[in-house]
Image: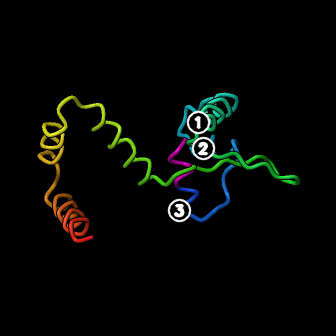
Amino acid sequence: MLDALWSAADADTTGLTARQVLDAFPEPRPALTTVLTVLDRLGRKGTVLRQEHADAPLTFRAAHSREDHTASLMSSALAAATDREAALLQFTGSLASQDLEVLRRAIDSRARS
């Protein structure tokens, strides 16, 4: 569901209706009521924003970008580690060289500020 909402945000739309979110699913698709229930639960968690319109259907959009969400998941995983250093070493050991270079530039940039 979030993938559909993030893709819509990338396309600069104001959000998707529940039907449009459902249409983004491959077959077999869940029921529309299931999509609405999950969107409601994601809304209560602050992950999805509901937008009510007087003359149009209810729309939904992601509260945060895909990148912000990913960074939050990574931070949560690190916070849950009992040995942060080991977790970081394992993580960086699994990165491709291009990703390591991006990480090096980010660390260098942060060290300078």
What kind of residue is marked 2?
Val
In the image, which residues are magenta?
Answer: 1-6
Q: Is residue 36 on the magenta stretch?
A: no
Q: Where is residue 113 in the image (x, y as percent from the top left)?
A: 27, 70
Circle 2: element type: strand
Q: Quadrant of the N terminus?
A: top right
Residue 63 location, x and y as percent?
A: 57, 49
Q: Earlier in the sequence, mark 3 or mark 1?
A: 3
Tell me: residue 72, above or below residue 33.
below
- Please name the amino acid that badge 3 sits on: Asp
**Contact, mark 2 vs mark 1 (Cβ under 8 Å):** yes
Label of residue 10 in the image: 3
Q: In which quarter of the image is residue 13?
A: bottom right
Where on the picture, by quarter, is residue 37?
top right
Name the residue located 55 percent from the left edge and 48 percent from the top edge.
Answer: 4
Tag shown at residue 103: none
**Magenta region includes residue 2:** yes
Along the viewing direction, whichever of 108 and 102 lies nearer the viewer:
108
Q: Circle 1 sits on which residue?
A: 42
**Residue name at image x 58 percent, y 33 percent:** 29
Task: Specify the farthest residue to the right.
Answer: 55
Q: Is residue 1 left or right of residue 13?
A: left
Q: Which of marks 3 and 2 is nearer the N terminus?
A: 3
Q: Residue furthest front?
A: 113
Local SS, label 3: helix
Circle 2 sits on which residue?
48
